[in-house]
Amino acid sequence: MKKTMIAALVAVSGVTAVHAAVITQVNANGSRSNADWNQTSTINASNPGPTWTGAVVPTAGNDYVANARLNSPTSAAPVSFGGDSLELSGAAQLQIRSTSSANTVTVGNLILNGGGVVPNQNATGSDFATLAGGISVIADSYLANLQNDTTAFRNTRYESTISGANTLTLKNNAPFTLLGASDSSLVIANAGNTFGGVWDIERTRAIFANAGAVGAGSISIQTNGYIRIDDNWSGAMTVASSLAQVEVGAGNTYTFDLGDLVVDGSAFNTEGTYTAAELNTATGTSIFSGTGSIQVIPEPATLGLVAAFGGGILFIRRRFMI
């Protein structure tokens, strides 16, 4: 009865249900400072417009799908994407533009469907970019920093909450490779991440600000990849190359169940607590560094079996002693 009355009232009033529109990118953003996700007309031949179907500025109530280069507005102040969601599909790339360290770009619901995010600062701008909001990874995608020589440093900090179960590659978006402490880095910062896929680290200095930032994901480190987790952490890690680097900071411990640490193609299954130097000796590599420790322990299920077996032996012994 109530449903019938509501339907009748809607029919009389002329009110209809409104669904979010899906608006698609029709022109890639160019290099001009005013070529960005708010562009509604052509600037010049190299910077055609508009960005979106209908020559619109992103607004609440609509979802947006990018398929090419898309720039955030060039700004020294924080900026936010106006739509309900932004999907980076296929070859789409969101370039974060900052001219000040005060500039944080916020995308409340960023959907990575094969695309990626890179920093793009002016030469006189800040040396890092920050992305906040939320990121959902629904296909293999990437997040990047950039360093293309010894003077161009574009550090990137991802403060967004990250979820999903695919492969998320962390990489330097240039072929240049330096992994020293003073080189460009990529920071994953949010302690509330629920990402459960694979963090694939390629040719970059990847730093997780805390254990929560890793979420439930496993870690795979490729040639010239570097990782540091600034916390005690337990999980699974594959170091795919002897040219990779794993640093354990002072006071921190990385803990692995048997079989969960794979180094240069071989699972490391010798229980114990190691310094970086001791683990390098044990694995015949020079991968590990730092003053923290690495611990390899039996799987919890194995410990449970041992405890149950020991309890059974004790029970039998007591029965025979009575």
Image (tube, helix red, strand yellow):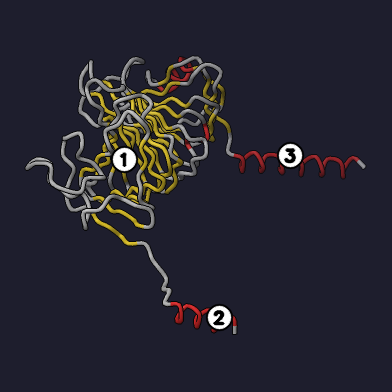
Q: Nearer the viewer, mark 2 or mark 3?
A: 2
Whether label 2 touches label 1, CB < 8 Å: no
Mark 2 falls on what kind of element?
helix
Q: Position of residue 83 (x, y in %)?
A: 35, 51
**Residue beneath disc 1:** 142
Residue 48 in the image: state x and y as whole percent. Answer: 12, 46
Dot label at residue 3 = 2
Picture quadrant where residue 300 is located: top right
Left or right of 239, for residue 216: right
Taking depth in this image into account, of 222 and 272 the one nearest to the observer is 222
Nearest to the eye among marks 2 and 1: give it. Answer: 2
Q: Is residue 190 left or right of residue 243?
A: right
Of pointers 2 and 1, the one earlier in the residue sequence: 2
Q: Amino acid at mark 2?
A: Lys
Report whether 249 appears left or right of 244: right
Amino acid type of the residue tagged 1 in the rendering: Tyr
Q: Residue at x 43, y 44 (%)?
A: 134
Residue 310, numbered label? 3
Is residue 123 visible from the viewing direction of this image? Answer: yes
Residue type at mark 3 is Gly
- Which of 80/163 is in front? 80
Residue 288 rendering spot, x and y as whole percentages: 42, 20
Q: Report the front residue among 84 and 232.
A: 84
Q: Nearer the viewer, mark 3 or mark 1?
A: 1
Quarter of the figure that contains the N terminus: bottom right
